[in-house]
Amino acid sequence: VTAPPIEWVGDEGGVLRVLDQTLLPNEERRIDLSDVDAAIDAIRRLVVRGAPMIGVAGAYGVHLAVRSDPARDAAAFSSALDAAVSKVGSARPTAVNLKWAVDRVREAAASFRDVASMKRAVFDEAARILDEDRRACDAMASYGVALFRKKERVLTYCNSGALATAGVGTALGVVLEAAKKGLVERAYACETRPLLQGARLTMWELMRSGVDATLLCDNAVAELMRRGGVDRVLVGADRIAANGDAANKIGTFGVALAAAAHGVPFHVVAPLSTIDLETKTGADIPIEERGDDEVLAFRGARAAPEGAKAFCPAFDVTPAKLVASLVTDAGVVERPDEAKVRALFSKARA
Ligand code: MRU
């Protein structure tokens, strides 16, 4: 049994051990993060990535920031904790799981009055977030598998598997679970330029699981669909607005448009921790801009003339009207809209 791609090793004085995803699929190397700056750097460089996994790394990042804090009273510790929460919480802007996780850790500490208990609460809450995400993935996988009508040809984008979560994944978790049940004829992974999370990470996960997997470049999606090659699209999300608009890796919107043009059902699979009721619509979702080099070069080799300009949004927003259903850990919402999304939360809280 290989180690999970993210795990806490040891007691409160331990380390966050992560698989360095920048090196996959060529090298499987784990690194130990033992201070907050290392955790933030790992999140920014996409050593750890994927919305729920960023949340888990962020929660433990806050623990790393405050575990040796010299504060003697609750007030002083709370200000150190607030500073850590805002520093870690802003490492990447789009995946709301990060903000959600660091806020949860802060709230967990708020019910205690002594520093030792507050520190313990931060650590315990980070562990709880990891564990809950693992279980949320299992729930999404079982709801998602119920969508399959026959042995299907499914297409996915970016990476939303075990490398993006603390469990089996969101959309890719559904694909892997469906494959186990004999419901996947073939899985298509889109390359996902510029950083190839599909080619490097999704193909790695699919092939290790023995799924019949085929890689296509992002601009081949419409042609594959025109040939009738895709029965269903499943993607993850980094933030879902209250009205069901869903931000995911840049290029997802184009896949949704191609799916709509060919009558292929397009599903978004994400835990409740990715849904942000405070973000009203997709237009309010902050979209991360990454460095020009990610587009202008590939693995250090220049791909465009010296001095070229680049457009580098890391995410785009698929409008809710293109989403056949939203598969969450609390159930499935067909044709999502604000009333249905809010009702899902009320049901989950009840
Ligand atoms: O920039 P990344 O690799 O963190 O982007 C990840 C994605 O867009 C995933 O599809 C998303 O987080 C949902 S999967 C859990």
Image (cartoon, rainbow, N blue to C red):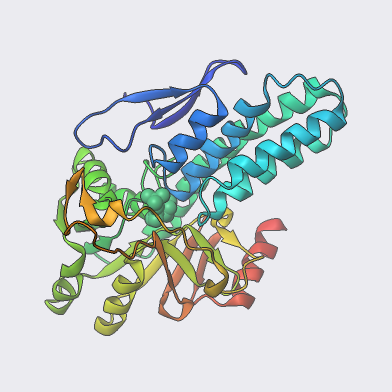
On the image, the x and y values in percent for residue 264 come to 28, 76
In which quarter of the view is residue 153 placed? Answer: bottom left
Q: State the image quarter where residue 126 is shown.
A: top right
Q: Residue at x 45, y 42 (%)?
A: 44
* Residue 330 as seen in the image, left or right of residue 30: right
Kindly tell me whether residue 298 is visible in this rendering.
Answer: yes
| Nearest to the observer: residue 231 or residue 39 | 39
The picture places residue 127, in percent across and down from the top left corner, at 59, 31
Report the quarter where the C terminus lies: bottom right
Q: Quadrant of residue 292?
A: bottom left
At 46% from the left edge and 35% from the top edge, which residue is drawn? 41
Q: Is residue 263 above or below residue 326?
A: below
The residue sitting at 73% across, 29% down in the picture is 121
In the image, taking residue 77 as reference, residue 330 lies left or right, namely: left
205 vs 140, nearest the viewer: 205
Q: Image check: 195 left or right of 104?
A: left
- Residue 310 to residue 283: above or below: above
Nearest the viewer among 207 and 283 is 283
| Image quarter hosting the N terminus | top left
Residue 101 is situated, as x and y percent measured from the top left of the image, at 61, 44
x then y, percent, for residue 205: 26, 42
Give the camera-side residue of 279 and 291: 291
Residue 182 appears anywhere in the view: no
Residue furthest to the left in view is: 227
Q: How many marks?
A: 0
Q: Residue furthest front?
A: 307
